[in-house]
Amino acid sequence: MYPQLKLDKQLCFRLYTAARLITASYTPFFKKFGITYPQYLILMLLWEKDNQVVGDITERLLLETNTVTPILQRMEKQGLIIRQKSKADNRKCIVSLTNDGKRMEEQIKEVPNCLAHSIVDDGMEIDDLKALVPLLDKLIGTIGKQTKQKE
Amino acid sequence: MYPQLKLDKQLCFRLYTAARLITASYTPFFKKFGITYPQYLILMLLWEKDNQVVGDITERLLLETNTVTPILQRMEKQGLIIRQKSKADNRKCIVSLTNDGKRMEEQIKEVPNCLAHSIVDDGMEIDDLKALVPLLDKLIGTIGKQTKQKE
DNA sequence: CTTTAATATATCGTGTGCGATATAAAAATA
DNA sequence: TATTTTTATATCGCACACGATATATTAAAG
């Protein structure tokens, strides 16, 4: 009836599906490390810069503590990170890599390139992948701006 | 260390974030109807064509029954749909809209346009939104192909 | 200095996603 | 027809997302 209610018209459904499928394509690579995609995101942040507080992580990932804290707890239980209260400000919680967490970087570093290649091999053109980046950044920036306005 | 492990380099993180943020921007509109985004997707399919079997829905949404069945059970409990076994093939489960489910179409039809306008108003250009569609379709098609190969 | 407000993180409940497995019915095969 | 295989859906367990709320600590105001 209403064309705007057709699934095939919806940008949102495409984003939802693309995100699910590409995350799923990471999963087999992570399986032998016993980590998940969101855990991988946090590890990447810590490989970039160790000893970050929870707030730094939630800010970069655009997630709330009610999502990140439980993930950090699982990662701590697995021995990938440790969490300790900041002495300067006892409210803050500093997240640090363990040696196990540090070692994983070396083993995982080829995964993103490997996946990109397999997508290109299966027919997606590199230029199209590259074209997505600024468009998604613009979209994320715009919606992020809306979210902040409402606060 | 490894540039491919920087968060800012990753297409996947952008898709993950964009999907989350845009879905979140739908949520306030759905709140007064008591539905969620995935439930909205299923309603759209049924508004397009009523009385579909579970398999039709999983195929269109690229989801498995282990995700869709619980959603359908919740929707049935809320009185939006009913589920009944097919007499022709007793394995199949036919999903049909209730009158409440049908009535919701009229009330929700403006939501997608409304959201698109608000994103454009906040600085995202229509051409950029339109440009995303074929790129995402290509990506989804490519990754979907990979997924099928492994079966 | 005490009270109040703001900040940082954690907890709880609900609804997905998804791997693994189970169940039941229909189709294919022996 | 009896047996095996395939198909369609459901169940179970775990890990997110996220709204709502709680707790503890620091900063600001009176």
Image (cartoon, coloured by chain):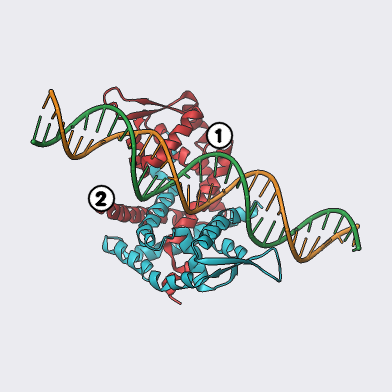
Chain colours: A cyan, B red, C green, D orange
Picture layout, residue B110 above or below residue A143: above
Evaluate if marks 2 and 1 touch, with contact meaning CB atoms under 8 Å apart.
no
Confirm whether circles 2 and 1 share one chain: yes
Pinpoint the chain carrying mark 2. Answer: B
Which amino acid, by three-letter code, is at mark 1? Phe
Query: Which of the pair A7/B82 is nearer the observer?
Result: B82
Query: Which of the pair B27/B84 is nearer the observer?
Result: B84
Pinpoint the chain carrying mark 1. Answer: B
Residue tagged 2: B151
Tag 2's secondary structure?
loop
Residue A65 tag number: none
Count residues near mark 2 (Cα–Cα under 10 Å), then give few for <14, some for 14-19, many for 20+: few
Where residue B10 appears, as percent x and y from the top left, is 44, 65
Q: Quadrant for the N terminus of chain A, please.
A: top left
Q: Residue at x 33, y 67 (%)?
A: A114
Closer to the eye: label 2 or 1 = 2
Residue tagged 1: B33
Q: Residue at x 37, y 25 (%)?
A: B84
Q: Residue at x 66, y 53 (%)?
A: A151
Where residue C12 appears, as percent x and y from the top left, is 61, 45
Does label 2 or label 1 sit earlier along the sequence? 1
Where residue B6 appears, as percent x and y from the top left, is 46, 70
| Residue A110 falls left or right of residue A99 | left
Query: Which of the pair A43/C17 is nearer the observer?
Result: A43
Which amino acid, by three-letter code, is at mark 2? Glu
Separation (CA) of disc 2 from disc 1: 39 Å
Query: Which of the pair B14/A146 is nearer the observer?
Result: B14
Q: Residue at x 53, y 62 (%)?
A: A76
